[in-house]
Image: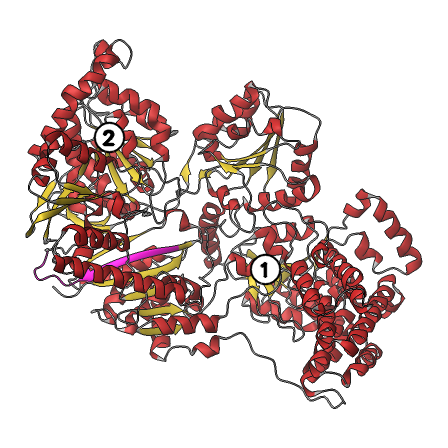
Amino acid sequence: MERSFASEIDKLKLGAGETFRGEAIVAVTKALLQSGVAYVGGYQGAPVSHLLDVMVSARDYLGELGVHVEACANEAAAAAMLAASINYPVRGAVTWKSIVGSNVASDALSNLASAGVQGGALIVVGEDYGDGASVIQERTYAVALKSTIWLIDPKPDLPTIVDMVEHGFALSEASHAPAFLQLRIRTCHLQGEYIAKDNVAPPVSARHRLAEPAGFLYDRLSHPPVTFGQEQDKRAMRIPAARDYIRRHRLNEHVKGTFGAVGLILQGGLYNTLIRQLAMAGLADAYGKPALDLLVLNVTYPLVPDEIESFCRDKDAVLVLEEGYPEFIEQQILHILVRAGIATDVRGKDLFEGAGEYTGEWVARGLAGFLEAHGPAAAAKDMRALADGIETSQEAGRAAFDGAAPPPREPTFCTGCPERPVFGALKLVEREVGPVHVAADIGCHAFATFAPFSMGNSILGYGMSLASTAAVGPIQQRRTLAVMGDGGFWHNGLQSGVAGTLFNRGDGVLVIMQNGYASATGQQAIPSSGEVPAMAIEPTLRALGVTWLRTVRTYAVETMVRTLREAFTTAQEGLKVIIADGECMLARRRREKVDEAKNIAAGARVETARFGIDPDLCTGDHACIRLSGCPSLTVAANPDPLRDRPVSHVTQDCVACGLCGEMAHAAALCPSFYRATRIHNPGLIDRLMHRLRGAVIGWLARRV
Amino acid sequence: MSKTISILINAMGGEGGGVLTGWIVAAARDAGLAVQATSVPGVAQRTGATTYYIEMARPDRPRRAPVFALLPVAGQVDIVLASELVEAGRAVAGGYVTPERTTIIASTHRVYSMPEKTATEDGRLDSGALAMALAARAQRALLVDLDIASRRAGVPIGAAMLGALAAAEVLPLVRAAFEDAIRADGRAVERNLAAFAAACDAILAGSDDPDDLARDTDPAVPEITTAFPAPARAAIAAGLERLSEYQGAAYSRLYLDRLEPFAVRDPALCTDVARELALRMSYEDVIRVAQLKARPDRRARIRSELGLNVDAPFHVAEYFAPGIEEICDLLPALVARPLLWLARHSRRLRRWRLNTRLRSTTVWGFARLWLLARLRHLRRLTWRYAAEQRAIERWLGLIDQAAHADLSLAREITLLSQLIKGYSDTARRGRADYEQILDELVVPLLDGAHAADDAAATVAAARRRAAAATEGAGGEVIAAPVSLASER
């Protein structure tokens, strides 16, 4: 794993009354233990990776408690894990990145939600939405709504979040339905504190096993004919039970203000953003006491109609603050009010047209529009002044560089990344065979969609690249290329891609980046990481019947060029798979750096290398950068008085992966590159040879 | 409650922004402030732009937590702390920096973005203009190079950013509070404290002047006593030095002879020709590569790059991959011509490379370089030499012809030689573009076959288009030379 979680594991062990200080997602992890969870699973992905990372790292401690932890093969497997709570009184939690993970898990989720649960089932989803998001912008709300899974969207502060984890389990048990705990990106990474409670060892667990399995009860199968009854059960039993729990435990907060006639209904997650803009306009104090009535929905599904009705009944208008599309909550509120015969004006998306994430800027603007239409004139004036001030700042910012905004800085392959050479090789091959259709995938290799590679025609989801070429191949004269990581291969690519292509006798090229980990999410282990040797990718593919199969070291650019060329041009039909083999450089350097430092300190002879560029040889055309894009390969002022365009330059960060030298050969680029090796703790012979050689070379050099 | 202070940190993934945020949070908390931090590392963890956001305030009563925001809002940020100049610019462009309340503390060093690096010419932004825009928008701007302190201490830039923040005295925290946070965290304490202290000193010594950040200025001009116009003399001096090293004194005299007719012409044209002619006459063949690699001062330069003292042993491996054309460059026309003819007809021969790795720090490796470099004495006999001299004469002739009628056209023709650069495929493509523009555009223009009103602009446009074309971005292969269709 990318980092050590030793200090986080200590935080998990805090007892009652002690102060937990740290990241919200770790606080959630601790809260699971406080709730007596018996099993935890999930699939890594920002922003919830740390939950699972901490749990996996804390396996020993969790074993003492009897908590079973599993790093699931994908989100569908994680969702299926919750089946333990269908038949047994055990609490379980799983986690993933949403919306994508929820999509993958959907089938199992539907079945789980139909059967219902006995033990509390909590799904912690990182809502990857807005600034910093890396996936399509959709709402988990749709999944909750269609499957009748409760959706908790807590106020973003640690005590509330922890509280809601505990309530989440109880709510799930009280209503026999699973619940989502939805956390936005910034909420997951929130640094804060709360007062811890003792962890609770689950009464039924890996330490206290049941003597007998559950008896046969057809009602617990999501299989006809009971599915018809389960559908009715949701409506008649589970939703009312959930509403009852939410009402009784006041999970939603009705905060009284001073203006009676207007109010705001908001998702709990938006609370802090709203309070800040109200406070800026003088409509709330710093601790959150507002001038307007607020209905803070810590649970956004199901809504509780009486809460909505009583909040709206005496008001002229309410504004619904609901992030994303479609505006499910607003529609339901309208529905509730119409049914109840309440004529309150409901405003919402009409005042937020064009908004994605509800930032402070958007909230101020929306509030100004709402108060101007429905609120006291003085408040409207203050809020409009605030919104105008924000807009003025934004415009001045845009104008600060005469319209030329700072250039984008997209994420890119790390220095020395083993995946970069593959795309460099592909660029070279495309010069010969012509451009090919490239199906991209999820993972670090998706950085190849950015400059300088700018490659990829589509992304259809994790592990879906090969499957997404099924109908492209047959309409192309050239073979298609699908790129997939080893993470994507095990997540989904093995069956939907490889098995599907072989079964349908598809033709095409698949490159599998075998770097050994799920690297983009923080180097989590995957089935081929080596812990279970039998699950290597190559024998797996052979067993499936892949006959054209090559494993190429990624840095061997010339071999990669040759292999790709052959794959694109060979007469042999069928799937051609190239395993591009090279360990994640971040992982490798982390290991090697420690060893290096230790050996150097111990006085051992150690060689360390880096690349360099002769500035007087470089003519400044930067072709090397366009083929590599390495962060350590940059530009610098030209020392040549006759040239003004900058030369290429290698920074101190170079890890001497060797790509520059390989590229200089494979692309016949440029003789400016050299590889310099430094000898730490040189021996006597090293020093003598160095002096001798230096003398001869110096003598020769003066006589060129 | 005291006023809430908001801090936006703009950095790049992998720079240790999370650690920096942790230090600030710890320092504030230990001083009894309420504090909250969050971030959007997400996928930006890998060198992309990323932000961290912190709010803090002193509550009326302990344990009573104010409601802190999770997102920065335009016009509502007190402190912007940026790890690099363009990242500071990004905060300004987002409207987070306002003259009413924002202090901006930023490192002035540059980590070039991809578009700046991949440009075929000079794509770098003007640091001076960037810094000026920052200073204009901020209430207070503290701009110093924090990278130097970090590199010297051998730690990520976070500690230096913390030092700058402490020295700026914009938070209700004393310097020792920040140092204690570094100590309590326990990561590379001594080195981080060193970077912290160096950054403090740099801030206290005063901000960089935006004018100093402007692009590197012209080097000092050595005296040259000839009839050439003053502006051209620096280039001529550099050209003479370059060519006498390249081929000897006689060759540099040839340079002066060729330049002579331009001495009486427009000084700007003379300067351009002096510069471009020196570069063209010192064309990059294998001999030139070996000459530069065998230079006596090169070892010292690499040694200092590695940070080594004179006695410390090191090795240097060189990468050469000459193809058939580069090898023909060393041969007389009699041998080179048939080989080149063969290469034109054989894909295999064209693709063939003599992949060579040699260690120039061993005697045998260096001796090979040295022998190659010594071949300069035979350079005049090579096919390439004759071809280059013919091309130079033709080019000078066209410039001269144009200079009689249209000075700006003459300058544009001069600049066309800049298309010829790089090695191997890059050089080949550049040369093809150059020749096509000469044949299809310049010659007809000079013959009066084209309307000549905007002749210079037309040539300049063709040059820029050719220069911007790369080896195929976005999967698109631009193998053919630039199209001149629009010019016709």
Residue occupied by mark 1:
B119
Work out which quarter of the rendered image holds the N terminus of chain A and state it.
Answer: top left
At label 1, the amino acid type is Ala
Task: Specify the subunit that label 2 lies on.
Answer: A
Q: Nearer the viewer, mark 2 or mark 1?
A: 1
Q: Nearer the viewer, residue A565 or A331?
A: A331
Q: Is residue A539 above or below residue B25?
A: above
**Residue A533 visible in image:** no
Q: Position of residue A4 (x, y in %)?
A: 34, 46
Which structural element holds mark 1?
Answer: loop
Q: Which residues are magenta?
A: B50-63
Q: Is residue B382 above or below residue A28?
A: below
Left or right for A644, reference B396 = left
At label 2, the amino acid type is Val
Q: Which mark is residue A67?
A: 2
Q: Position of residue B409 (x, y in %)?
A: 73, 72
